[in-house]
Image: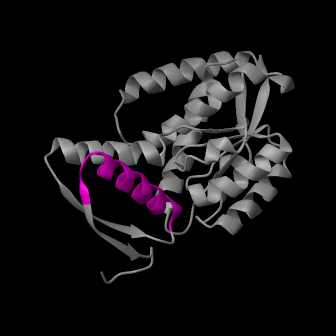
Amino acid sequence: MKNRVLGLLLSTILVASLVTGCGTTDAAATETTGEAATEEVAAQPAAEDNVVKVALIAPITGGYALFGEAGQNSAQMAVEEINALGGIQIELLNGGNAVDDAGDSKQAVNAYNSVTAESPEAICGTFSSSCSIPMAELAQEDGLLLISPSATNYKLTLIGPNIFRACFIDPYQGKMAAKFAKQEGYTKAAVIYAKDDDYSNGLKDAFVENAEANGIEIVYTGECTTKDTDY
């Protein structure tokens, strides 16, 4: 039972991180429902084998901190709501907080090694492809379930059957962007991308391929870096 619902529960947590701030709720109704559910759970404590330990890895500092903080907050909210329903309970390790990878691939590997010391049953994270891919390679070797909320590089889930994502992929985004340009009647396009960013490279390749297939001429391709300020 636990193994069957683990993936669904983690997907719920991560999808919440993608839609944080996109809607509103009736605060009074939410509070009332939450209190009633919490009282019911308190009356029936979860058995130890009914608890799923999940580690959260996200960029809490660095250039992607905005995404990481939103993901951490929404994951905490999702876990609170899921646990209030009773049944399978989720325990977020590290005191309920994300382990910071700072958007850096080396720190992501360090974060992975840090959380695995607490013996999680699954890992939520991380947010960028450049950090998620090396983590996913380790998770697959270790037999751990890993789900990224926003890593769009298509290679991520090809690493193995334990690796998942809760979002679209770069080829899909590039295809839709080219389709939109064609629908709007554009026949020429210029492409500027950050050569030191996997996400930017993936979008560039996908858009160029699909633009040319849709009869859109790429008249200029320019490189920059994520640290450039003068274009």
- Residue 165, compared with residue 204, is above or below; it is above
> Which residue corresponds to the image point at 51% horizontal and 72% vertical from the top-left?
196
Whether residue 115 is visible here, answered yes or no, is yes
- Residue 130, compared with residue 25, is above or below; it is below
Whether residue 94 is visible here, answered yes or no, is no
- Residue 220, compared with residue 69, is above or below; it is below
Residue 104 placement (x, y as % from top left): 62, 67
| Residue sitting at the far left | 185
Residue nearest the observer in this picture, 161 or 39: 161
Q: Quadrant of the C terminus?
A: bottom left
Q: Quadrant of the N terminus?
A: top right
Residue 162 placement (x, y as % from top left): 73, 37
Residue 60 belongs to the span the image colors magenta: no
Residue 130 placement (x, y as % from top left): 60, 60
Residue 215 belongs to the span the image colors magenta: yes
Q: Quadrant of residue 194?
A: bottom left
> Which residue corresponds to the image point at 46% horizontal and 41% vertical from the top-left?
18
Residue 214 placement (x, y as % from top left): 27, 45
Instruction: Identify the magenta region.
Output: 197-217
- Left or right, 109 with reference to 21: right
Count of marks, rendered view? 0
> Which residue corresponds to the image point at 18% horizontal and 41% vertical from the top-left?
183
> Which residue corresponds to the image point at 66% horizontal and 42% vertical from the top-left?
158
Q: Quadrant of residue 83?
A: top right
Chief secondary structure of the magenta portion: helix
Residue nearest the observer in this picture, 27 or 166: 166
- Left or right, 189 with reference to 93: left
